[in-house]
Amino acid sequence: MRSSMLALGGLVALASGPAMAAELRPDQIAFRDIYRELVETDTSAPTGSCTVAAGRMLDRLRRAGFGPDRAEVFVPEGHDKDGGLIARIEGSDPRAAPMLLVDHIDVVAARREDWPRDPFRLTEEKGYFIGRGVIDDKALSAIWVDSLIRMQAAGFRPRRTIKVALTCGEESSDAVNGVDWLLRSRRDAVQAGFALNEGGYGISDKDGRPIALYLAVGEKYAQSFTIEARNSGGHSSRPRPDNAIYDLADALAVVRRLSFPIQLNPTNRGYFTRMGPIVGGAMGQAMERLGQGQDDAATIATVTGDVTYNAMLRTTCVATQVEAGHAENALPQRAQATIQCRLFPGDRVGDVEAKLRSALPSGIALTRKGDKGAPAVPPPLDPRIMGPAEKLAQRHFPGIPLVPNLLTAGTDGRYLSAAGIPTYGVPGIFLDPDGNGAHGVDERIRVKSVYDGRDYLYALIRAYAEGR
């Protein structure tokens, strides 16, 4: 998922996070073992199994005292390796809506020959955890399991029921998506008043000093289209003006120029208002003005000059793949390209498709690729969510602002939000400016960041579980 991190490595941090003890506490040792087991269980689509990983987490919950009525592995029919885990701690107040802790345990494939070390071995080196999934997204999954075990051991009885769902398919949803399957087949397991998910994170400078905590409040929706030009073709020795590749190139030029309107909502306004003073300079001033609703042309031009900020403000469409021709000595009979659009929260796929269709030259076919369901509904900037997150951020990371963030990438939260369950991406784990190699070779995360984030998120879960 983590593709929308803002590179702010040159900024000076406001404060340092809590110091990490030279030796691990007993509870940190227990957490590390959960984390290790998850990372060392291959859950990539080509070679691994989410079902195996879910079973190993279930074994840990069983040893902690979770019976079959409170924790189980589910396996969608026909997808033996795409299973997941559901668990719960019952609340004391039946009037309080449950909360859901959700995360995906599947990871992007990692080939051993591409890595200098085994990608499915948790390596700790020079202050970093290294391995496939250490940041996307097994740290959070391990924190969810660890939190249940800690609360069980402490005899904690929350006011509201706490549900957990670890699922498969976020990275490879062409097979089956666990969250989508649970909503359709086991709605009781995930029905909640709100959900906490991946998508939030902290940003830090190149030396690891924290700058800000991003709490994801809404995300964009990915929808791909195919555009295609066709022609009768012929021999390359007799070229003619009409050519499928040239026609496709003309269509791609139209897509390149296509622009969608700027949209301000409470989330991106809050982001620009809070991040403007941190960014500083002309850009920071423009961000502050935009956050205050001053959307004049000069301000818009400055802010949208940054590709991340531009993506936070509008629907975007971009060409991502091209395929054309069938032989080097033949005129092309067809040429096609994939266009991926990222819809601003609340925009409809049909409207975006209509705008594309009206802009494309005649003779260019436009086809929607797949049907991923309804776009995510943006959750509200609810003070019952923002308040505890901000209060605890100041306790765990003094001086570091909590910033609402519109996630320009996508998560499984879109299924939950579309089903009426407001879903928030919680922060706590700080990333480096380079994105930590997520989906790449030597995926890594600072050891200190994981342990600090674990402490923050455990406190946050308890605060929400007791809140009104």
Image: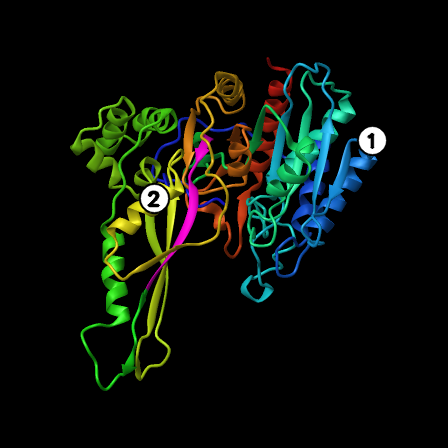
Which quadrant does the C terminus fall into?
top right
Q: How is the image coloured?
A: rainbow
Q: Mark 2, residues whose alpha carbon is within 10 Å: few (<14), some, or many (≥20)? A: some
Write the start and end of the magenta stretch as one range.
Answer: 214-228
Which residue is drawn at the image coordinates 29% and 72% (left, top)? Answer: 231
Q: Position of residue 170 (x, y in %)?
A: 56, 47
Q: Is residue 182 above or below residue 363?
A: above
Frontmost residue, 297 versus 445: 297
Choose the circle earlier in sequence order: 2 or 1.
1
Q: Main secondary structure of the magenta part?
A: strand
**Residue mark closest to the camera, 2 vs 1:** 2
Using the rendered image of the protein, determine whether residue 20 is visible from the camera's viewpoint: no
Q: Amino acid at mark 2?
A: Val
Q: Residue 287, which numbered label?
A: none
Of all residues, the one furthest to the bottom in this rendering is 237
x, y (%) of residue 323?
37, 68
Calculate the distance from the C-alpha at mark 2 to the C-alpha at mark 1.
Answer: 50 Å
Q: Nearer the viewer, residue 120 or 307?
A: 307
Give the residue drawn at x 42%, y 48%: 223
Q: Are marks 2 and 1 in contact (CB under 8 Å)?
A: no
Q: Which residue is mark 1?
A: 65
Q: Nearer the viewer, residue 222 or 437?
A: 222
Q: Which residue is mark 2?
A: 352
127 displayed left or right of 433: right
Which residue type does callout 1 highlight? Answer: Gly
Disc 1: CA contacts within 10 A as few (<14), some (14-19) or many (>=20): few
Secondary structure of residue under mark 1: loop
The answer to whether 57 is drawn above or below residue 460 in the figure is: below
Q: Assess whether residue 111 is covered by the magenta stretch.
A: no
